[in-house]
Image: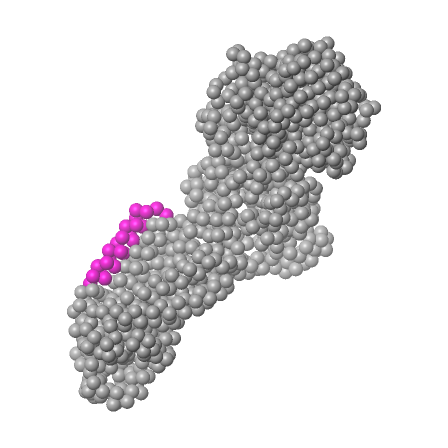
Amino acid sequence: MNAKPLIIWLVLCMIGPAVNAQGFAGLGTTAAEGFAQPSPDLPLVFPRDHGAHPDFRIEWWYLTANLTDTEGRRYGIQWTLFRSALAPGEAEGWQSPQIWMGHAAVTSARQHFTAERLARGGIGQAGVSISPGFQAWIDDWDMAGDADLGQLDITAAGTEFSYTLSAHTQEPLILHGAAGYSVKSTDGQASYYYAQPNYQISGTLRLPSGPVEVTGMGWLDREWSSQPLSQEQSGWDWFSLRFDSGEKLMGFVLRRTDGSVDFRSGTWITASGTAQPLPPGTFQAEPLTQSTVAERQLPTRWQVTLPDRDVSVTVEALNPQSWMDLSFPYWEGPVEVSGSHSGSGYLEMTGYE
Amino acid sequence: MMRAAFHTLLSYWSRHRFQLFALVAGLALATTLWSAVQAINGQARQSYAQAQDFLQQLDGTSLVSPGGSLHLSDYVTLKRQGWKLTPVLEGQYRNAGQSIDLIGIDVLTSPQVARLFPAESLGGDSDFLRGILHEPGGIVLHPETEKLLPSVLKEMQIFRSEAVPLGLAVADISLVSRLLQRPDDLSRLILLGDTGPGAMPSADSGADMRPPDTRALASLPAHIKLAPGGTARMNPGTLTESFHLNLTAFGFLSFIVGLFIVQGTIGLAMEQRRGLLRTLRCLGLPFAQMILILVVEITLIAVASAFIGLILGYFLAASLLPGVAATLSGLYGAEVSGALSLQPAWILSGLAMTLAGASLASAHAFYTLWKLPILQAPSTQARGQRLLQSYTAWAAAGIGLSLGGVLALALVEGLIGGFMFLGGVMLGAALLLPYVLWSLLGMAQARTRAPLMQWLWADARAQLPGLSLALMALMLALATNIGVGTMVSSFRLTFVDWLDQRLAADLYVTTLDDAQGAEVQAWLSQQGLTVLPIRSKEMQHSTGQLKIYGLRDDELYRNNWPMISARPEAWDLLVQGRGVLVSEQLARRADLQLGAHIDLPAGWPSEILGIYADYGNPHGQAMVSLPQLLKNAPDVDNLRFALRLDPTQVKQVINMLQERFEIPRENITQKDLAKARSMAVFDQTFLITDALKLLTLAVASFAIFTSLATLWNQRLPQLAPVWAMGVRRRSLALIDILRSLLMAGLTALLALPLGLLLSWALLVVINTAAFGWRLPVYLFPMNWLALVLLALLAAGLAALLPAWRLFRISPSELLKVFSSER
């Protein structure tokens, strides 16, 4: 018996609309019944907002990292915890309306391993707590550390891989948009969105070929909302780029169902760690090369330009086959940056049918 | 030539319609019984296969708590340690006198979920999962189960799926834990993936890098154990196999008996057409063509009969199936669909069986045709010596088979041994029969002086070859009747006794909830009535499902409990909380003797104080004192009560309960009613056995009749000289009937010990292996007498027509024997 189609279906029906909030299913189609809505007037408060927001429909804790082993080989890792609510609020035990999903991946130039976990809220199998320290977990996957996220220990395991990493930073958090209120469409759809793009990471990847000691840089994204996409939006291309100059760029393109660009935005992060929201439309990303991935065409080489900052770079996937073939499939993998700036980063592409 | 010959041979049947009828009836009957049994078995197996298929995942290697104290936090802890598990919560939901088995699965992690999709929603209808997870929740069940659903549950969204086994409903664990009010309990945790604990991780094993290994297994909390797949639930397939073997044996027996009829009829037709065939051969019809025509003829008849048989078989099966379904559900807890579905394989196999049977039955006739020179008349007398030789060989084979059966009983454990014993002894005895009859008749002949009597015995022996198959069939049918009849009657008698003991209280009340239960109990006590709460805790035991009841010390139990064996002070020790009573099934499954200890979770008493009968229950059962139950399981329902009343009070108490507490009438059961209901279920259960018993006997009687009819023509040459010597036709006819009665009577007498042996095997060997309980053997001589009389009646009736023809035969016919001997 193949449970796979079922879970895919499950996620598309239940979680899909929520998790895929940035676009590839119809989250925007249902007005959120009783869910809280982001508001620009409510500032983020930490460490409270590192924790879960069960009154919002969707939420995630999303860590990606570009890593290098002692021989200079490049790797990418992903550790993600998604929360999706069937109804607002929390309840005891099995009656909880919260559903949690974990995704983990390790990518090298030639290989790409993925794993997934699903769990119910309310029983303790998955969740996020903020005291005494921070802890996000699902099954035996953990991301735990101090309350202000300055230090994190991260573990995950899949069929063919596992990893144990630790992350440190003393840099401040980056609040995207207006102090964390990030607009996602011209209709006003929005989310709360902040990040910590400055983790120094070290640890061990365990791959079929054996353990690999790695070091590198990590980027944690935190976002929650109830209806972040408008009805016309079908998917997105999201870039987090870390330049050797110390500057960083987060930019995204939301595509319409007809494939055209609907909304572009992003944040420029200076070498000193100051976040500068980009005026809508200034961030531009054009596909250069299409690859066949999982029987569909996906751009795995991009031209990214930001004229205001004299950025004109080529962003190329380390491994074009970084396909997350999970309950809901998408592309997520490390990228190399060259051109006016050099560096590395992560690319996420969703909604490619 | 061919056409003319075909036409000529076929025309025989229009002149001998009764023979055609006997032939078609024999084949059709054989097919009917065989195919009916096959249809029933097929339907049942299909139901099992579906259930098995579905439950396999739910019954895989699991982590369980033998005492049933698996807590939600255990699951979470293990998941956090990296175990790949999916939880299952099972239980019975009761409401207002209705109940249904619920299985709760975690739809997020259970591989079962894919099986639950309503077929029409596979395309991606999101209603299904929304319905399952959103308030008020959804339930998936087999369409036939819907009528069992307590009405409260009908408010849920109902999804129908043929994949779900009958008699249970599947829902998300959130809903099931809510309905069962067991928020923190789990029944078991199924290990997911191909890699069990202990296997080393490898890149291509399909398991995660860090599966629970042996160390993880060792680190399990003490109350959690690894249970191999298949322990949580008895596999209905193996348990019910005995039942289906039984049916198959019945069906096959009937089929064989039917073939005896066919064999006789075909033999007769060949015999009677000998002259015709000779003429055709003389006219130049090649032997091969003649055989071909005969083969085509018998094939046509066989196919036509097969279809009649299949149609009758289908209706027979359809009418018996509800009873069979009740039996299987009641005795084994195996649910079988009561609706018969027509399967093409069944039609084909029925057809093939009939054709094979017809060719087998006609083989002898064809062989004779081929072997005997066409111009030579049959000489019945000369065959005597040859016959004795073949009878001796048969008898030797029969003794061998019987000994093999006895050996099998001694060497092979359980059901299979029992059935091998039965098969060997039954078949062996049947093979012995002709030799025994031959010898008995010979001895009788040697002891008689009167010439006519001597002739009677000799003639009976001469008739034996033509009758022996039919007599073997009769013996098997009679023995089966005696054996199965004794089993059912013994069971019934035991069951009635046991019901009296178990349903000793006068009134049984089920309240709507615990609160009402407490009120009712308090109020009844105030009235000075003896209230016996019926409270139980269900748990998983290493032998399967187990229900532990808490008994309040009462005369009623002490005086009536159906103990099979018990320590003398059993009740006192039970009341002191120092031990436990277990049902016979549980004792056998767990191999428990008096004084041994049963593996219950810590806190429960464990010493076996007594073993009691619990007929008809597929699950294990145990009794502790009420305080012990409440100490170990304080949260058990308090809904059911037994009341000891004066017969005059019953009506009044019922009225008061209804008025004061608004308890629905169906929740109040009087003892007599409960008994009547149980007996009705019991009788329904054995309906199929009774039906097949009678049908088999009917077929055997029909076989005797056709055999005698077949012999009729062969016998004229032997009767004519006796008549010529002065014995009147009336006497000859009377002697004919007498001889038939004699043969049937002898056979019936021989069938009696065989039947008793059969009933012993069924009651003591097969029952114990199949059901887990042993029944005392009761003997019913009146029933045997009735059966012997029935056999005599059948034989007498069967002899009546030939005798009548003999009585009415014109002397010229008898004279012709001398003038035109072929």
Picture coordinates of residue B114, whole percent (x, y): 57, 41
Picture coordinates of residue A141, whole percent (x, y): 59, 24
Residue A36 appears anywhere in the view: yes
Q: Quadrant of the N terminus of chain B?
A: bottom left
Query: Which quadrant of the structure image shows residue A334?
Result: top right
Q: Is residue B697 above or below residue B572?
A: below
Q: Which of A260 and A74 lies nearest the eye of the viewer?
A: A260
Q: Which of B35 and B613 lies nearest the eye of the viewer?
A: B35
Residue in the picture at 33% in, 56% down: B422
Q: How is the image coloured?
A: one colour
Query: Which quadrant of the structure image shows residue B793?
Result: bottom left
Q: Quadrant of the C terminus of chain B?
A: bottom left
Residue in the picture at 38% in, 52% down: B766
Q: Which of B634 and B134 lies nearest the eye of the viewer?
A: B134
Q: Is residue B270 above or below residue B632?
A: below
Q: Which of B773 and B370 lies nearest the eye of the viewer?
A: B370
Residue B748 magenta-highlighted: no
Tell me which secondary structure the magenta stretch mostly adopts: helix
Side of A263 relative to B678 (left or right): right
Picture coordinates of residue B62, whole percent (x, y): 50, 35
Q: Is residue B278 above or below residue A35?
A: below
Side of A226 relative to B266 (left or right): right
Residue A228 appears anywhere in the view: no
Residue in the picture at 25% in, 69% down: B288
Residue reaching furthest to the front? A288
Picture coordinates of residue B170, whole percent (x, y): 59, 44
Residue in the picture at 32% in, 53% down: B421
Q: How many marks?
A: 0
Residue reaching furthest to the right? A41
**Region in magenta:** B392-414
